[in-house]
Amino acid sequence: MDPEAVACGERVPHGSSDDPDLLDFSANTNPLVPDGAEAVYREAFDAARTYPPDDYPEYREAAAEYVGCAREDVVATPGGLAAIRLAVEVTVDRGDSVLVPYPSFGEYAREVRLQGARVEPVPHDELFDVDPSELAEHALAVVCNPNNPTGEAYVQGKLEAFAARCAAAGTPLLVDEAFLGFTDRPSLAGTEGVVVARSLTKLFGLPGIRAGFVVATGNLRARLDVARRAWALGTPAAAVGAYCMGCEAFVAETRERVRAERERMAETLGERFEVHRSDSPFLLLDVGERDTSEIVERAREHGIAVRDATTFRGLDSHVRVAVRLPGENDRLLEVLGDA
């Protein structure tokens, strides 16, 4: 990390409300958690009185089975953000250029700038059109799949072809798969030249646990392992994470519920707003000529928090709403129906 860049750096806005009186549609986390997760957390207390094994064998084994890669290619991290930072730290130097999609997760650009590197912004739906001859000019390329905040997943064949072009150019590709678990699409984990960042925050509804991991092969994986912090993952987080990744029935039920509710919400909201196609547990709404801040405030007055998406680069008339439980979604639809 570059000290000069840190001195002039800044935070980026995120969703999530700490107000217990608000029903939070601004953060895209599952409102349900797997049965038994709390018991696992409590049972890990005694083990937390000593340092965890630094290589986290059980957690890495669960992660490898979860995404379909070799255990030795998994590096445990305290959340997906830590995975993203670690990937940027081992691939990007001061003065480098990095291909960053927009609108997309604001932390990509922030991490690149904290390294003293330059962000090369590319529309997220044009990233795969970058001339192969130009890829070698960049230290890293970033993809969010499915993309946040727009919601759509990339066509698998096109994503794999882009990964191959990056590998041929010698440019590592960072793929953030924070929301991929809500789909049945395969992970790029284990693909040559690709660094995959995963988070357990969204799918398993546990943002405060701070559990994630990063996957890479060969020299990339070796660099990640050398650079990672020792004992980065707390014992309870590792235990709960390993347990949750094995809850296949919970994952399947969540995917079906989110799919059905997302379709229902999109149909109703489409009567008043332009709704972007989504494969994620959220929907991006273009509110047109309406005042975005007024819609956000009106929702708050009715006890609901929605995300002002104008903080994302390239968006100026948008809000983002999560897909929650049916009854909760009904409340949102009622409030936004009059917006």
Image: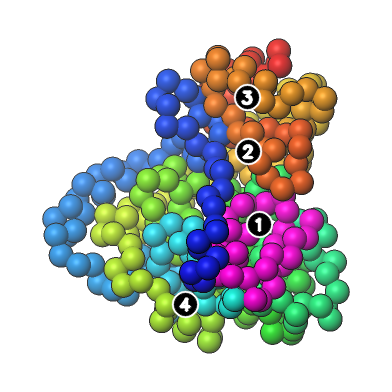
Task: Say few, some or many: other residues with alpha carbon within 10 Å of mark 2 (under 14 / 14 to 19 / 20 or more).
Answer: many
Q: Residue drawn 32% across and 45% down?
A: 37
Q: Amino acid at mark 1?
A: Asn
Q: CA distance from mark 3 to mark 4?
A: 40 Å
Q: Secondary structure at mark 1?
A: loop
Q: Could you say which disc has been placed on residue 224 in the image? A: 4
Q: Amino acid at mark 2?
A: Phe
Q: Secondary structure at mark 4?
A: helix
Q: Which residue is mark 1?
A: 145
Please identify, in this view, whether the residue under mark 3 or under mark 4 is nearer the observer.
3
Q: Amino acid at mark 4?
A: Leu
Q: Which residue is mark 3?
A: 296
- The answer to whether the residue labelled 3 contacts the one labelled 2, judged by CB atoms less than 8 Å apart, is no
Q: Amino acid at mark 3?
A: Val
Task: Say few, some or many: other residues with alpha carbon within 10 Å of mark 3 (under 14 / 14 to 19 / 20 or more).
Answer: many
Instruction: Tell me the quarter of the picture where residue 283 sits.
Output: top right
Q: CA distance from mark 1 to mark 2?
A: 13 Å
Marked residue nearer the N-terminal end (2 or 4): 4
Spot occupied by residue 295 in the image (x, y as percentages of width and height): 67, 22
Marked residue nearer the N-terminal end (3 or 4): 4
Q: Secondary structure at mark 3?
A: helix
Residue 191 seen: no
Marked residue nearer the N-terminal end (4 or 1): 1
Is 305 located above or below residue 64 in the figure? above
Q: Which residue is mark 2?
A: 282
